[in-house]
Amino acid sequence: MKIGFIGLGNMGAPMAANLVRAGHDVAGFDTAAVRVEGVTLCATAAEAARGAEVVITMLPNGDILRKVAAEIVPAMEPGAVFLDCSTVDVDSARAVAEQAQAAGLSALDAPVSGGVGGAEAGTLTFMVGGDAAGFDKAGPLFDAMGKKAVHCGPSGNGQAAKICNNMILGATMIVTCEAFALADKLGLSREAMFDVVSTSSGSSWSMNTYCPAPGVGPASPADNGYRPGFAADLMLKDLRLAMQAAETADADTPMGRAACDLYARFVEEEDGAGRDFSAMLPRFETRGRG
Ligand code: NAD
C-alpha cells in the first residue's frame, strides 16, 4: 500500500521501518531532522499525505494532532484512511475523526501499547476506534506493526480503552510497590512476597510480568536501574488524559486521581523524570508515613 507517515519519533520511526519491511511504499514527514531507512522523506505533512491510501500519524499530543489534521485532511483523497496511533485526549480524537469523515475519509484512532520495544519488534497492540471498513483496510498495517488489533467501537473508543487500561496499570503499579515496601518493613523477603502474590489473588501484570523489585521475577526495568521501559513521564501523561476524560464524562475515579497526583509529584518534584514508572518502589522503600 501507499502510506504517508507523519511523526517519525521514538515510536513512529520503528513502526514506519516495519511497514517498509513488509513491502509498503512509505512517504514520511517529521518537523525534526530524522532518517528512517526505506522511507521517502517529504518537505511537508501534506506532501506525505497526498495520494496515500492510508496516512498514519504518531504525534506527541492532541493539539499537534489537530494542527496536522488541518493540513493533511484536505490533501487526502476521498476513501483514504486517516489512522492516528498517537495517545491523545478523547475529545481531540473525536474532533479529528469528524473532520476526516466530513471530507469523505475513514478515520481511526488506534493508540498502542507495547512501547518502543514493541514498536521495534512489530509486536504492538492497537486499540482501535472508528468505522469497520477503515479497520478492515488497515488490517495488513496492524499486522506489519503489531501482534493484535482490537476494534473497540466508534471514534474515540480506542483512546478510551487505552486510558482506562493505563489507569488500572498506574494504580496497580503503585499499590504493588507500596506493598513491597510494607513487606520489607514487616520482615518478609521479596522472593517470598513475589512467590505468594504472583500466584494469589493480588497477582497482576505489574507483579507477575513487570515486577518492580530488582532480582525478583522475570527480567524487568528494575533489573536495569529502572531505565525505561515505560517512563513515569508517559504514565503521568496517560493518567492526566484519563482524569480529563473522567471530568468530561462525570465519572468518579478516586484511585485514578490518587495515582495521577502521586505520579505528578514523582515526576515533577522528586526524581521520577526519565525513570521507569516502576521506580515507585525505591521511592516508597526510603519513606516512612510522615
Ligand atoms: P516522540 O516525541 O519520540 O515522537 C514524536 C515525533 O513527532 C517527534 O519526532 C516530533 O519531532 C514529531 N512532531 C512533532 N510535531 C510535529 C508536527 N507538527 N509534524 C510532524 N511531526 C511532528 O514520541 P514517541 O515516544 O514516539 O510517542 C509518540 C506517541 O505515542 C505519543 O502520543 C505517546 O504518548 C505515544 N506512546 C508512546 C509510547 C512510548 O513508549 N514511547 C508508548 C505508547 C504510546
Image: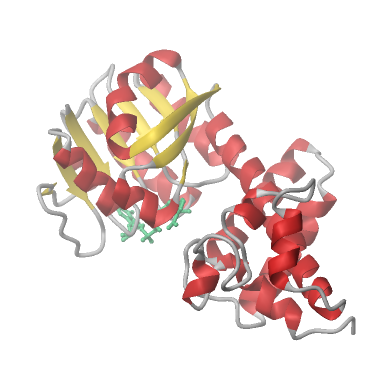
Q: Which residue is found at the position 71% from the left and 71% from the top?
A: 190
Residue 190 is left or right of residue 45, and the answer is right
Residue 69 is left or right of residue 182, and the answer is left
Q: Quadrant of the C terminus?
A: bottom right
Residue 138 visible in the picture: no
In the picture shown, does residue 229 fall above or below 164? below
Query: Which one is nearer the viewer's eye here, 102 or 192?
Result: 192
Q: Quadrant of ligand 1?
A: bottom left
Q: Which residue is found at the position 82% from the left and 72% from the top?
A: 183
**Residue 135 screen position, x and y as percent:** 39, 21
**Residue 272 screen position, x and y as percent:** 60, 76
In the picture shown, does residue 108 fall above or below 33? above
Q: Which residue is found at the position 44% from the left and 15% from the top?
A: 132
Q: Quadrant of the N terminus?
A: top left
Please identify the quarter of the rendering in which residue 71 is found: top left
Q: Which residue is found at the position 68% from the left and 73% from the top?
A: 281
**Residue 229 screen position, x and y as percent:** 47, 63
**Residue 233 screen position, x and y as percent:** 55, 66
In the picture shown, does residue 207 fall above or below 45? below
Residue 149 visible in the picture: yes
Residue 9 is left or right of residue 207, and the answer is left
Query: Which one is nearer the viewer's eye here, 27 or 118?
Result: 118
| Residue that sits furthest to the top in the current view | 133
